[in-house]
Image (tube, grey):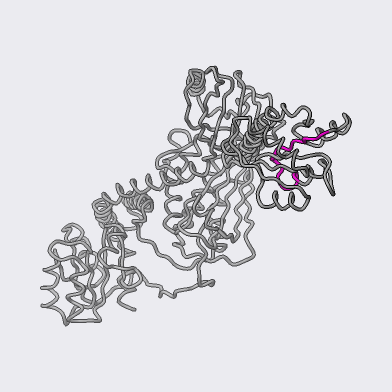
């Protein structure tokens, strides 16, 4: 029972008020009475505060008990109302009870009043508890209904009895589609039977199972969920139902996959960067000496074919090294503003001869000029790789289509897919109607040395290199595929901010043109230094050699008036190339300089050699390219 009570007594006869008060005092209730006699007093009393119970006569001046009860229901709906009257017919009593009176007590049966008051108060407590429980239930129900995670409840056999709206939103199934069905309707086949066996073993033992499930929506799309499935028990501890609370983690998994892919590319890039210098020096020597042989033998000499084949092999090795360096942005790129559609038309001319007549190759390019900051040659490499892969996926012919459009990547899309920033992007779509790629292979498609082709038909580097190039250009590449329906790649490249194509005029250099200038050549690799000197002397240049940075400064001090060009290896003993350049530029500020190195681009930046400020050429370099670059620097 409640503690101290406030009881309101509506009675116009003083003797009857005293009678009622005496009867209540005979109970064990702790209360404070308030006596009112008129309608106004009554209204004012319940307006000030709601009493715990109201006891009212039926026949009153100005109004009756029914009217008083209506006023009480409006002001204090939870307060019990008992009519205490001298006489009332049965019909009126029934009307009062139907109208909400807790009881009707005749004054000649006033002994019942104490019990009636206690009963009314108990009923009020039960009603309050019921309303509280209902409110709590509604709150929990709304929490489940509006939950951001998927919730379902099954019986012991696994038949679904309830799913919340988030479940239907994620899976695409309506509530009526799944009630009475088993959750295994969501299985994609990607999760092993052992996982499900462990799940059932766990929840049937009364424990909670946690894990990731790769499920399938109504439309066939696959999605990832992190699930917590637990038993529901009755008061005796018996399992009656199971409840599954599942969070859609598809976006999280995609983000993690992008992160892992980036880390793998970085690891491969670090490995490639570690061997690049020595490998490029070796290639430079092979290319250089073979080129000298080629220059000195007649065109009809049988050995010329061998020399040409050696150069071709070296070129492939050099391209492979550059491709590997793309992974972690360690290669040197020649960024210019490129008109994307022109680049794709050039690719079309290159690959149309490769893909065969049984493949319908189409370009559906945006009418809008799309400009991107890119290395044109590397862009060609991306699209050629994708086109040749598409050809291999369509052995019996098919359709290959490349489209372009400008799209806006917002912050949310950028976060999910791992873009470096949001903004306007040029999107290139390369779509084929080929065999398609298995879902489990799609997750590894950009990994180095992973290939879906037969043994001996692919290196597994084409898509890895394409991935790295796109990353280096500040873009992103995604892939979608369906078995039997083809594959679709989307390449996103940031739109150039200046909005128009920039062209840079570079004078055409005749590589066979001889020079007469004096060149200070600083190279710590003796074989390469010897090779470069022989080549330069062959083409008329005077060469001063230096084997390290300090020797280069000494030799310049002796010949500063005659030196026209510095060729400096970036990394040398004692003093590096940049330190040599800075020391010499103090003596001769306008000294023309060409940096050369087999190290990677990130190291060049560390040494302060920015491509837009200094002339730079990366090993391995062919004699023709070196000679052309020398003339370019000298004639600027």
Which image quadrant for residue 112?
Answer: top right
Q: Is residue 397 visible?
A: no
Depth order, front residue of 1/162? 1
Is residue 508 depicted above or below 268 in this figure? below
50 up-or-down from 198: above or below:
below
Residue 611 seen from this side: yes
How many numbered discs? 0
* Residue situated in front as seen by the camera: 228 or 15: 15
Quick one: quadrant of the N terminus?
A: top right
- Residue 538 position in % (x across, y down): 24, 67
Q: Is 549 left or right of 504, judged from the image as shown?
A: left
Left or right of residue 159, residue 455 in this image? left
Indicate whether residue 74 is drawn in magenta. Answer: yes
Give the residues in magenta: 72-86
The answer to whether residue 63 is left or right of residue 568 is right
**Quarter-of-image position of residue 534:** bottom left
Residue 294 lies, with reference to residue 449, above or below; the image says below
Residue at left 35%, top 60%? 332
Horizontal and vertical percent position of residue 380: 48, 56
Residue 257 versus residue 239: which sits nearer the camera? 239
Percent position (x, y) of residue 533?
A: 20, 65
Q: Residue at x 58, y 20 (%)?
A: 240
Q: Residue furthest front?
A: 15
Q: Give the image quarter of residue 619.
A: bottom left
Residue 208: say if magenta.
no
In front of the other: 275 or 139: 139
Q: Quadrant of the C terminus?
A: bottom left
Position of residue 578 measured from the top left corner of the image (x, y, whole percent): 22, 69
């Amino acid at each position: 029972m409640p503690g101290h009570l406030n009881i309101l007594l509506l009675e116009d006869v003083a003797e009857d008020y005293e009678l009622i008060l005496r009867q209540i005092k005979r109970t064990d209730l702790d209360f404070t009475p308030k006596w009112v006699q008129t309608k106004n007093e009554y209204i004012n009393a319940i307006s000030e505060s709601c009493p715990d119970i109201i006891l009212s006569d039926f026949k009153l001046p100005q109004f009756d008990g029914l009217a008083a009860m209506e006023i009480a229901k409006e002001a204090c709906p939870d307060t019990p109302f008992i009519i205490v009257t001298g006489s009332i017919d049965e019909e009126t009593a029934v009307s009062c009870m139907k109208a909400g009176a807790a009881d009707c007590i005749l004054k000649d049966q006033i002994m019942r009043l104490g019990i009636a008051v206690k009963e009314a108060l108990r009923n009020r407590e039960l009603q309050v508890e019921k309303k509280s429980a209902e409110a709590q239930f509604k709150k929990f129900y709304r929490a489940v209904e509006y939950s951001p995670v998927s919730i379902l409840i099954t019986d012991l056999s696994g038949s679904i009895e309830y799913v919340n709206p988030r479940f239907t939103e994620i899976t695409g199934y309506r509530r009526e589609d799944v009630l009475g069905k088993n959750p295994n309707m969501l299985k994609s086949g990607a999760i092993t039977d052992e996982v499900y066996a462990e799940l059932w073993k766990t929840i049937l033992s009364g424990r909670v199972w946690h894990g990731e499930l790769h499920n399938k929506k109504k439309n066939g799309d696959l999605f990832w969920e992190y699930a917590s499935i637990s038993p529901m028990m009755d008061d005796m501890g018996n399992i009656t139902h199971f409840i599954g609370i599942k969070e859609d983690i598809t976006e999280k998994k995609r983000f993690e996959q992008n992160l892992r892919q980036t880390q793998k590319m970085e690891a491969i890039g670090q490995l490639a960067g570690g061997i690049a210098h020595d490998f490029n020096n070796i290639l430079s020597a092979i290319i250089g000496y073979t080129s000298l042989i080629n220059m000195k033998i007649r065109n009809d000499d049988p050995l010329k074919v061998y020399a040409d084949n050696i150069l071709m092999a070296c070129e492939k090795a050099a391209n492979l090294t550059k491709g590997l360096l793309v992974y972690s942005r360690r290669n040197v790129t020649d960024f210019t503003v490129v008109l994307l559609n022109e680049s794709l038309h050039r690719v079309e001319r290159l690959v149309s001869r490769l893909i065969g007549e049984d493949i319908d190759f189409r370009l559906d390019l945006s009418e809008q000029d799309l400009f991107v900051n890119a290395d044109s040659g590397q862009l060609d490499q991306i699209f050629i790789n994708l086109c040749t892969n598409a050809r291999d996926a369509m052995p019996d012919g098919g359709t290959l289509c490349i489209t372009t459009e400008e799209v806006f990547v917002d912050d949310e899309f950028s976060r999910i897919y791992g873009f470096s920033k949001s903004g306007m992007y040029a999107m290139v779509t390369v779509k084929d109607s080929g065999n398609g790629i298995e879902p489990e292979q799609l997750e590894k498609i950009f990994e180095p040395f992973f290939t879906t082709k037969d043994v001996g038909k692919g290196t597994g580097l084409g898509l890895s290199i394409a991935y790295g190039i796109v990353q280096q250009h500040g873009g992103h590449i995604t892939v979608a595929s369906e078995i039997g329906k083809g594959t679709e790649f989307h390449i996103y490249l940031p739109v150039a901010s200046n909005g128009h194509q920039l062209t840079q005029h570079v004078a055409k250099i005749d590589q066979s043109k001889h020079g007469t200038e004096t060149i200070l050549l600083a190279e710590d690799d003796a074989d390469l230094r010897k090779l470069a000197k022989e080549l330069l002397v062959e083409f008329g240049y005077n060469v001063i050699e230096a084997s390290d940075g300090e020797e280069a400064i000494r030799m310049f001090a002796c010949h500063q008036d005659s030196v026209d060009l510095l060729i400096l290896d970036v990394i040398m003993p004692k003093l590096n190339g940049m330190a040599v350049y800075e020391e010499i530029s103090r003596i001769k500020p306008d000294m023309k300089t060409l940096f050369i190195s087999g190290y990677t681009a990130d190291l060049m930046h560390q040494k302060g050699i920015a491509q837009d400020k200094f002339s730079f050429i990366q090993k391995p370099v062919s004699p023709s390219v070196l000679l052309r670059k020398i003339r370019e620097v000298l004639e600027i």
